[in-house]
Each structure stands twice: as C-alpha cells, then as structure tokens.
Amino acid sequence: MANDLYTPAQVASVAAKLLSDNIAVAKMVNRDFSSDFVPGVGTVVNVRIPAALLADLRSADSTQPVNLQDLTEAFYPVTMDRLVVSAVALTEGDMSLRIEDFASRVLAHQMDAVADQIENLTVNALKSAPLAQTAFDIANPLPGITGLRKELRESKIPATGLKLICGTDVYAGLLDSGVLDSPVNQPTESLADGVVMRLRGFDVIESTRLDSTDLIVFHRDSVVLATRAPQIPQGAAFAATVEDEGFAMRYLRDYDSYRMRDRSSVAALAGAALIPARVVERDYDAATASVVEKPSALRVEVAI
C-alpha cells in the first residue's frame, strides 16, 4: 500500500502544512497562547492582563517613604471547548489501487475540512464585535476607514497589527471606488481566502464567511485563537502530533478489522474568543491607576 511508506511524523507534518495553507482569517489573529495549554489540566488558556501602575512624581529632595504598589495581574480565560475532527474510512481497495498520493487524495481533503471549522470559529468570534460609531459611505470609503482607525486608536489599540476583513459586496465597492488601485495599497502577501491589501494602516482581506455587506476592523490581539493537539491514545501504533505556524493537531491512522478498512483521522482542540482591550487609565490628582475594558474590534453594516 502506497501510504505505508509514510511514517506517522511525516504524515502529521504534511497535514499541518496543508492546514496552514488553507487558513486565511485565522492567520490574522493571535495564536501565541496555544503553548500555554497543558494536556490533562483542563482545556483553558489564560490570557494575562497587565497590571496597572502609576509612578510617583515627587520632589528630588523628598525623604518620605516611597509608595509601594501591588503588582497584580488578571487573566482572561479562553476555553478550547471544541474538538475539530475529520475521520474517513478507507477500504483495502482504496489503499492499494485508487490512492496514488495519500497526501493529495486523502489528507488534503481532511485538512480542508479542519481548516474550514477553525476559520469559522475565528470569524464567529469577530462577528461578536460591537457596532462602530463611525459613518461609512462605500462610494467614498476612505473617510470611514480613517474614522474606524480613529475609534480603535482612541481605545489605545496599537497602530501596528491593524486588520480589516469585509464581505464580498463591501470589497467590490472598495475596488469600484479605486482606493485599492494606488501603488501604496498593493498586496503584501497572499492567504488562502484572498490577497492582503494595505489601506490606511489596515491589512485588508475579503472573506466569504462574512455577510456580504459586513466590515470588521480589529487588531491582531483582538482575537485569541488556541489550537492544541489531543493526546495520542495508548496503543495507537500509527499516530503523531505536530504544530505548524501556531496550529497544532494530531494525526491518527488505524485498521478496523471488523469492516476490513483503514481509518484516517485528524483532530485538534480549538477555541477562539474576542478579547476586549484593557486600557490603563491614570488619575494623576488622585494618584490612582485602573484597568478599564474598551472594544478591541468594531463592526460596520455597510449600506450598499
């Protein structure tokens, strides 16, 4: 059988690369927290929230005691409560006669299905963003995009790492308006679902997963996407886990002697959450500092 030439690690590595190649929006968000998950210790990743401090402003000649503050970090939990799995049955005839290339004929379809669910989790998290206050005119979109950037920046969202995804009608309107024709707005990279353009400091991509008239602006850290490979079952002879570009998964193949066929399965624990921006607000008169929540993503229902 052709795929007996693969080791479990080789198959898992190919699967992870196929997964990464099929993902677009999920690549635009924060995946750095996946490694914080410890197998066997729940399915929660805790995102650290920085402490809020206010430095003392005192006379250089002061002999008064320095104000000692508590350095207390909070956490925002992201639960990996979904098992994304694709399992297919392969007959002995399939394995020995019809599958010339296991990666392209079997694994590619499984990874496309897994990538689709991970993309869906990510986009659904973004869809929970509140509506923006900025008016948006698709015939003259630049003032609206500038206004959306201003709204995010007023929430202390960093100026770098800004993203914009939109539905097909909105993207068509951007094309018709000519704002994407400028040389400074030319593609920076390609993703599975489209080409990334640059506009007013945003990476812009069209997504068919949004309503055609929706537009969402956000920062890379607005959404935390965590994926982790489930543990390999004891007794599994052909299995491996692997991670590629922040996406982790498990590959497993075994033989069902009752039905006389191989089984190929790919699985990943996954969870995505929209994280509000934590802004440190300081009252210099009262000498206090606190952390307040503000929107880290904004949604626009564009009139077409």
Image: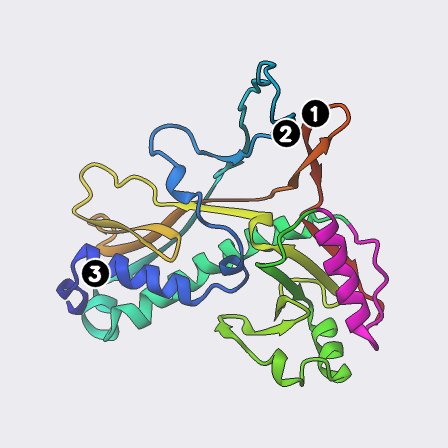
Separation of disc 2 and disc 1 at Cα? 6 Å
- Of 64 and 113, nearer the camera is 64
Whether residue 207 can be seen here? no
Residue 233 lies, in percent from the top left, at 25, 38
Q: Label 1: how many residues lie within 10 Å, few (<14), some (14-19) or many (20+)? A: few
* Residue 90 against residue 185 in the figure, above or below: above
Given the image, on which type of amino acid does mark 2 rest? Leu
- Of 215 and 287, nearer the camera is 287
Q: Give the residues in magenta.
A: 131-155
Separation of disc 3 and disc 2 at Cα? 52 Å
The residue lying at 37 percent from left, 49 percent from top is 267
Residue 125 lies, in percent from the top left, at 62, 48
Residue wearing tag 1: 288
Horizontal side of 235 relative to 135 (left or right) equals left
Res. 148 image quadrant: bottom right
- Of 226 and 114, nearer the camera is 226
In what element is the residue under mark 1?
Answer: strand
In what element is the residue under mark 2?
Answer: loop
The residue lying at 62 percent from left, 61 percent from top is 163
Residue wearing tag 3: 10
Q: Are marks 2 and 1 in contact (CB under 8 Å)?
A: yes
Residue wearing tag 2: 54
Separation of disc 3 and disc 1 at Cα? 56 Å
